[in-house]
């Protein structure tokens, strides 16, 4: 496999950057295909390494080192990226599709650049892949992480056509990094806001909120002024029927609680089948039970061994 030849790198100073014809920069789809192939190779490599480790442990009678899936995959991923991109100039996927990665000075990329580029590639993906889509409109077909790390992805046989002199901005471009973080943060907050808005418009949330607002158990616990906030929600559908679970934070002038509601879809409409919360003493309060005043005598199921006889007795009184 032929890697990037450092001897063929462009001879430029620290303040000079090389330029290529636009058609010599690698476009989005070729990079996508190369990265997809690299992902497939990494998946196979993980399976092989994991199988070998298990086999060695089995044959030697020793305990398997016990790498977690996350730890083993991380080690393989970084070894693959640093070795091929830094020392070879191209991964196997890049070689198959005839592309290579270089610094904007026309030289082989450093390990620092590969680490920065790889870390910030996740930021390029966070705002709905906008950092990668940027390749289509950028003059040098750079993704956001290319701009931050100071790299180009070019065709393997590309030759520079121009050398330009620019102020050397350092490895990480501060303005670009700040802009990227702000964009990712805004996109993330917009996404969370959209999810919360859709949840609050859902039938299950409206029904749960209406039920909780009128529930005497809840009013006894938090007071009459009630505010709501969704913590999490999940739904499972099976044709026209389905179930839903909502966890809702409820606060008022007397305190706050977290209520879990379970709903079931019957005859085209949602119905609450269970709802409750844990009080200050960590006792579960089922708010679907009838409320009979501030003093409630509840029968709890307790196992009390007395002369080998199991008895069930009265639990406690709420104040």
Image (cartoon, grey):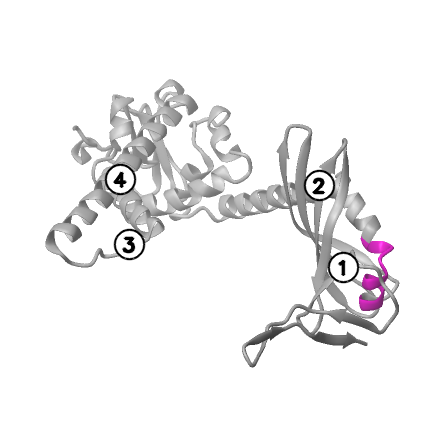
Q: Identify the mark nearer the N-term, 3 or 2.
A: 3
Q: Which residue is mark 1?
A: 250
Query: Where residue 31 sits in the image (x, y, percent)?
Result: 37, 26
Q: Are marks 1 and 3 in contact (CB under 8 Å)?
A: no
The residue shown at (78%, 76%) is 317
Residue, disc 3: 67
- Residue 268, placed above or below residue 46: above
Give the position of the C terminus as an image quadrant: bottom right
The residue wearing badge 4 is 47
| Residues marked 2 and 4 touching at CB (< 8 Å) | no
| Relative to 176, 296 lies left or right | right
For label 2, the SS is strand
- Identify which residue is drawn at 37% across, 20% down: 21
Given this view, does label 2 or label 4 mark the residue nearer the observer? Answer: 2
Task: Tell me the CA gap for discs 1 and 3.
Answer: 42 Å
Q: Is residue 291 visible?
A: yes
215 magenta-colored:
yes
Q: Which residues are magenta?
A: 212-221
Image x and y of residue 248, in percent: 71, 54
For marks 1 and 2, give the CA distance. 22 Å
Is the residue marked by circle 2 packed among few (<14), some (14-19), or many (20+) residues within 10 Å? many
- Contact flag, marks 1 and 4 (Cβ < 8 Å): no
């Amino acid at each position: 496999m032929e890697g990037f030849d450092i001897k063929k790198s462009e001879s430029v100073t620290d303040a000079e950057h090389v330029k290529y014809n636009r058609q010599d920069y690698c476009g989005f789809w070729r990079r996508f295909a190369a990265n997809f192939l690299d992902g497939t190779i990494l998946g196979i490599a993980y399976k092989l390494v994991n199988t070998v480790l298990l086999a060695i442990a089995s044959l030697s009678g020793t305990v398997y080192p016990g790498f977690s899936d996350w730890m083993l995959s991380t080690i393989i991923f970084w070894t693959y990226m640093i070795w091929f991109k830094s020392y070879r100039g191209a991964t196997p996927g890049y070689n198959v599709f005839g592309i290579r990665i270089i610094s904007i000075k026309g030289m082989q990329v450093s390990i620092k650049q590969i680490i920065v580029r790889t870390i910030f590639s996740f930021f390029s993906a966070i705002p709905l892949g906008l950092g990668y889509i940027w390749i289509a409109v950028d003059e040098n077909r750079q993704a956001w992480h290319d701009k931050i790390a100071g790299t180009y992805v070019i065709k393997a046989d590309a030759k520079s056509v121009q050398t330009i002199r620019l102020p050397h901005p350092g490895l990480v471009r501060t303005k670009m990094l700040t802009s990227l973080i702000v964009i990712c943060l805004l996109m993330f907050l917009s996404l969370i806001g959209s999810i919360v808005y859709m949840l609050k418009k859902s039938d299950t949330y409206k029904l749960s909120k209406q039920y909780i607002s009128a529930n005497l158990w809840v009013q006894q616990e938090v007071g009459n002024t009630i505010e709501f906030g969704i913590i999490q929600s999940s739904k499972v559908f099976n044709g026209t029927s389905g179930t839903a679970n909502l966890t809702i934070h409820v606060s008022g002038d007397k305190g706050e609680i977290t209520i879990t509601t379970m709903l079931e879809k019957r005859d085209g409409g949602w119905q609450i089948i269970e709802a409750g919360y844990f009080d200050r003493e960590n006792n579960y309060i089922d708010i679907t039970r009838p409320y009979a005043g501030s003093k409630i005598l509840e029968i709890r199921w307790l196992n009390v061994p007395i002369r080998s006889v199991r008895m069930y007795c009265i639990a406690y009184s709420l104040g």
